[in-house]
């Protein structure tokens, strides 16, 4: 816990005030306008405050950062398998558009890739049934899911300019990976207007 506090203090010294969330693999979106003593129970944070940074913490899930050309709002979104199915990114963009966002851009941070996210047949069928582009295989031929590809396809279909990450958290030892290590820390995706 001391390391987490030290890391958060270091990030605050770089980015200024940062809002974190209590992520639950759901579809809740919280609009924030300042620092609170309680972290929002959400998988997405949206703000219009220019000097307030938003953070998403991950260790294989996709850290999705969204902003618009006019810099009217920004969002940090936690997208895992459940979040993709629940449409947390789409709900976040709906709120951003209600706040005046028109041309939304997306940055997908490092996450587990389709070669490494091995799943059982039931989970594969559930996700690939909704997002056929998520269908993937491991090097040994087992069923797997390419969540970043599915999210990129979903966002592009909504007219969002997407910048994907080529980094797989499982394959790259410089990143935390729950799938690879079991017990692990988290990396942060941070955005600020």
Image (cartoon, grey):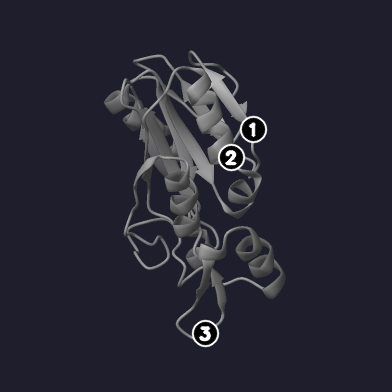
Q: Nearer the viewer, residue 182 or 57?
A: 57
Residue 64 visible in image: yes
Left or right: where 78 falls relative to 126: left
Q: Are marks 1 and 2 in contact (CB under 8 Å)?
A: yes
Element under label 1?
loop
- Residue 138 spot, x, y in % from top left: 49, 78
- Residue 67 spot, x, y in % from top left: 37, 29
Residue count near mark 2 (Cα–Cα under 10 Å), binned few <14, some 14–19, many ≥20: many
What is the C-alpha distance between the residues marked 3 and 1?
A: 35 Å
Rendering quarter of residue 105: top left
What is the C-alpha distance between the residues marked 3 and 2?
A: 30 Å
Q: Quadrant of the C terminus?
A: top left
Q: Are marks 3 and 1 in contact (CB under 8 Å)?
A: no
Element under label 2?
helix
Identify residue for label 2. Answer: 88
Q: Earlier in the sequence, mark 3 or mark 1?
A: 1
- Residue 66 spot, x, y in % from top left: 41, 34
Residue count near mark 3 (Cα–Cα under 10 Å), binned few <14, some 14–19, many ≥20: few
Identify residue for label 1. Answer: 28
Left or right: where 92 falls relative to 106: right
Identify residue for label 3. Answer: 141
Vertically, is 59 above or below 129? above
Q: Residue at x 43, y 56 (%)?
A: 111
Q: Residue at x 51, y 64 (%)?
A: 133
């Amino acid at each position: 816990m001391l390391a987490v506090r030290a890391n958060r203090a270091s990030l605050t010294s770089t980015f200024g005030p940062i809002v974190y969330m209590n992520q639950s693999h759901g579809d809740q979106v919280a609009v924030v306008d300042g620092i609170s003593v309680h972290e929002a129970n959400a998988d997405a944070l949206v703000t219009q405050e220019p000097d307030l940074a938003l953070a998403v913490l991950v260790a294989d899930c996709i850290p999705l950062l969204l902003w618009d050309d006019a810099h009217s709002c920004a969002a940090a979104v936690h997208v895992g398998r459940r979040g993709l199915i629940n449409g947390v990114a789409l709900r976040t963009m709906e709120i951003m558009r209600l706040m005046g966002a028109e041309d939304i851009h997306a940055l997908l941070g490092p996450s587990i890739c389709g070669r490494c996210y091995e799943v059982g047949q039931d989970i594969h069928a559930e996700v690939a049934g909704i997002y056929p582009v998520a269908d993937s295989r491991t090097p040994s031929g087992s069923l797997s899911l390419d969540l970043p590809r599915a999210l990129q396809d979903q966002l592009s279909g909504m007219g969002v300019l997407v910048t994907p990450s080529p980094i797989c958290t499982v394959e790259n030892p410089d990143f935390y990976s729950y799938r690879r290590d079991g017990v692990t820390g988290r990396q942060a995706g941070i955005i600020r207007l």
